[in-house]
Image (tube, rainbow, N blue to C red):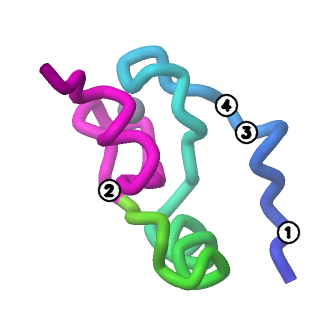
Amino acid sequence: MIDWCYSTASRCCHCDQRACFPDERTADRFVTKSERRLVSFACPVGNGWHVIYPAVELKASVPRR
Ligand SMILES: [Zn+2]
């Protein structure tokens, strides 16, 4: 069971309003649940942990010429 709710999580203004996970364990539960399509990383400004969906987000954020 996931007791932490993504939609009500606080957002990190440093990381594109990404949801803040309180710790790595919680973030990793989402990674596992996504069948490891998500990747977790520690917030560079100390707002906990975030998850990223590289297959979607990196493609979107790196414009092709
Ligand atoms: Zn952050």
**Residue at image location 57% in from the left, 52% down from the top:** 21
Give amino acid for label 1. Answer: Asp
* Label 4 vs 1, first from the N-terminus: 1
**Residue at image location 79% in from the left, 60% down from the top:** 4
**Residue at image location 82% in from the left, 40% down from the top:** 7
Tag 1 near tag 2, CB within 8 Å: no
- Residue 63 in picture, x, y percent from top left: 23, 22
The magenta-colored residue range is 41-65
- The residue singled out by tag 4 in the image is 10
Tag 4 near tag 3, CB within 8 Å: yes
- The residue singled out by tag 1 in the image is 3
Give amino acid for label 2. Answer: Phe
Query: In terms of depth relative to the viewer, which is nearer, 35 or 30?
Result: 35
Residue 41's label in the rendered image is 2
* Label 2 vs 3, first from the N-terminus: 3
Residue 56's label in the rendered image is none
